[in-house]
Amino acid sequence: MSKLKTHRGAAKRFRFTGTGRIKRNKAYSSHILTTKSTKRKRNLRKSGMVDKTNERAIKALLPYL
């Protein structure tokens, strides 16, 4: 069987934690920031975890990470 290719777009967006969960960055933090509160923008800087229902799909895109 041939090697599987890594989805390069997904590889740039997701990282695996030590326990096997998947980290992601939050959306809505790149523009139109003047209408968002300071607290909201501060919380958008933090990383989030991928939901359990989406983990299988993302792991299929990242076979070797």
Image (tube, rainbow, N blue to C red):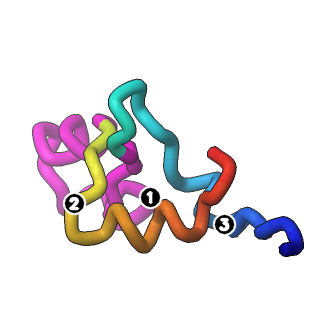
Figure check: 58 above or below 44: below
Mark 2 vs mark 1: in front: 2
Q: Which structural element holds mark 3?
A: helix
Q: Which structural element holds mark 2?
A: loop
Q: Amino acid at mark 1?
A: Ser
Other residues around mark 1 within 10 Å, as few (<14) / some (14–19) / many (≥20): few
Tell me what residue is drawn at x 27 percent, y 45 percent: 48
Residue 65: % across, % down? 63, 45
- Point out the residue furthest to the front here: 1
Viewer-closest of 48 and 39? 48
Contact, mark 3 vs mark 1 (Cβ under 8 Å): no
Residue 43: % across, % down? 19, 39
Q: Which mark is residue 47?
A: none
Q: Which residues are magenta?
A: 22-46
Figure check: 8 above or below 48: below
Figure check: 38 above or below 37: above
Q: Which mark is residue 9?
A: 3
Residue ID for mark 2:
51
Q: Is residue 32 left or right of residue 11?
A: left
Q: Sequence order check: which comes first, mark 2 or mark 1?
A: 1
Image quarter where the N terminus lies is bottom right
Tell me what residue is drawn at x 22 percent, y 60 percent: 51
Q: Which structural element holds mark 1?
A: loop
Tell me what residue is drawn at x 66 percent, y 66 percent: 9
Quarter assignment of residue 10 = bottom right
Other residues around mark 2 within 10 Å, as few (<14) / some (14–19) / many (≥20): few
Q: Sequence order check: which comes first, mark 3 or mark 2?
A: 3
Residue ID for mark 1:
30
Q: Amino acid at mark 2?
A: Asp
Q: Is residue 21 left or right of residue 6?
A: left
